[in-house]
Image (cartoon, rainbow, N blue to C red):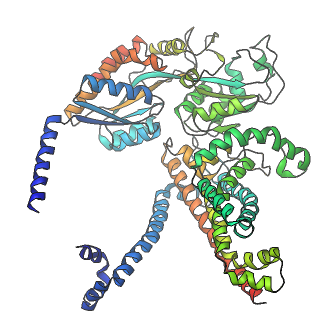
Amino acid sequence: MKQIAGLLVALLLLAGAGIVLADNPLTINGAGASFPYPIYSKWFDDYHKKNSNNQINYQSIGSGGGIKQVTEGTVDFGASDGPMNDDQLKAFRDKHGFDILHFPTVLGADVPAYNIPGVSAELTFTSDAIAGIFLGKITKWNDPAIAGANKGVNLPGNDIVVVHRSDGSGTSYIWTDYLSKVSDEWKNKVGKGTSVNWPVGLGGKGNEGVAGLVKQTPNSFGYVELIYAIQNNMPYGKVKNASGNVVKADLASVTAAAAGAAKDMPADFRVSITNAPGKNAYPISSFTWLLIPEKFSDAAKRDAIKGFINWMLVDGQNEVEALSYAKLPKEVVAKEKQALAKVQ
Amino acid sequence: MATTTTTAPGAGPFAGSRSFISKLRDGDEIARLITFLFAASVVLVTVLLVYELWVESALPRHKFGLHFLITKVWDPNLDQFGALPFIYGTLVTAAVSLLLAVPLGIGAAIFLAELAPAQISDILEFFIDLLAAVPSVIYGLLGVFIVIPLMREYIQPGLKNTLGFLPFFQGPTYGVGFLTAGIVLAIMVIPYIISVSREVLLSVPRDQREAALALGATRWESTWKVVVPFARTGIMGSIFLALARALGETMAVTMVIGNTPTISASLFSPGYSIAAVIANEFTEATGDVYLQSLIELGLVLFLLTFILNGLARLLIVATSQRGSGVGQA
């Protein structure tokens, strides 16, 4: 019995020494959007390597969950693919007595995907065509609204099978935000959101679910996240932007959309860049945001988070294209650095 | 050491009785207490579950009342929520799956228990148990890559051409939909029906068969008229286990049902089920009414399962009385 007790004491002492030696890194918890999770986890990992006394944990539980948890104060920061609305901001202020700030990190985009047997050409879609198809008003592939933008392509008279996301997602938010801007009917009838009451179509779970349905179903039309399309070598269509140019989504045209919006960027960064002006702007693009409380009671946490954002805006941006995310335009980076001073 | 900790929670009702402590020494009382606590925990968990679902769905219950159950609109932007298409989808897919799985499953169980040589029966039973343990996402993938293309290319057009006059087999053929979900669910629940039914059939006493055979019944007559009726309650039990799984299945269903809240007589139509919509929309549900409506859907699913199970019990009681009558005659 004495021997066991002695062993236990020795173990406890060793464990105590271990804790002291490890210097107890500061742990910061975040939760939210799953779309930027690959780049976030790489960023947090790289940042930890440079600053071993900070450890940032991130759970990709979805934008809605991120907003909810940061409002409830169970995590230090949130992340979302759609900006918080006024009600949500008010809820945060009522609970904490100060505001929450949005910091754009990277950009994403949605691309139209389709599967028409016998058509291998890269199709171009106008905003009217996309809205008409998703409203269920354009039902045939050879409708003039589609054929008009694709002269020389022999489109069949088959019924279009619309495919959308069935799970709530930032990807759907971007798509419906775009449709709300280009079609008043969509705005009044359906609106924007991570989940909406779709007028027509089949639902697929996740990007892979939509991509699978589009690949399998003849005459289908859907939308997937640009990164998903790039990484899986999926063909996708071009879109006519607000300036009347036909643009194919890629990292440069998505960044161009953000640059077009940067001039009129509101101070709180809650801006939608769908249907953005700019010659080369890809119109179905969006920021994704970190949600950072304005005040921290723990100064060490505040400095660590501010340090991370500063690093993310400069060094971190060089890592994003390797993972197929579009990086922030310079104008936005400069504005964010100024805004960071508000975090106290 | 062990006795003091385990008696502590149960000591309350029997406090003050000294003989109780001496009884504990026998072990019987301890076993009774421990097993009672385990059994009670099941009831407790169920009660807590309903309580949580009830409390957490207060907003939509007050806002929509019973209209929640009969409204078709599900619109997060307008904060309008109705469960009807999801209830419909859940019931239709479960019904289709049982319609397919019950005859197949019971037929297979009869073969394995009564007709097949014991070795073959045991080998097949091994595979059936294996099937029952396959995760549902695997069945979902099977549905996506095999059942959906088969449905779209062959089965749905075939049904449309032959039975297209029926309202069940009309409309466009996407491959996904109620029928596809029902078929995938049937594949998933058949192992349950076979496995449980086979055990029940095997446990029918030998005298029953021998008596039937001695009275001049053929092998099939003794199986169908004596053994199966004798095992009826257990077979019913296997069907209700299958029904419970079909009602609550989430992953495989959402991968093949089309995820569109529709109410249509056509089994080709895409639909939606309660479990699938909860799984799809819960993580991104931001508004309070929206989130609580999803929780209320969970409550509806629980009640649905509860009611169907209750009906099942009644059915068992009714048929087992009739069954015993047949046995006496």
Looking at this view, is B52 or A27 the one in front? A27
Quarter occupied by the C terminus of chain A: top left
Looking at this view, is B112 or A46 the one in front? B112
Farthest top residue in view: A279
Left or right of residue B165: residue B142: left
Determine which quarter of the picture holds residue A174.
top right
Left or right of residue B38: residue B192: right
Q: Residue at x 59, y 59 (%)?
A: B301
Determine which quarter of the picture holds residue B321.
bottom right
Looking at this view, is B147 or A343 the one in front? B147
Place of residue A287 in the rendered image (x, y in percent of width and height, measured from the top left): 47, 23
Place of residue A10 in the rendered image (x, y in percent of width and height, measured from the top left): 10, 49
Q: Residue at x 58, y 32 (%)?
A: A207
Q: Is residue A45 above or below residue A70?
A: above
Q: Is residue A62 above or below residue A160?
A: below
Q: Is residue B69 visible?
A: no
Q: Residue at x 46, y 16 (%)?
A: A321
Place of residue A320 in the rendered image (x, y in percent of width and height, measured from the top left): 43, 18
Q: Residue at x 39, y 14 (%)?
A: A318
Place of residue B62 in the rendered image (x, y in percent of width and height, measured from the top left): 53, 59
Total number of numbered discs in the rendering: 0
Quarter occupied by the N terminus of chain A: bottom left
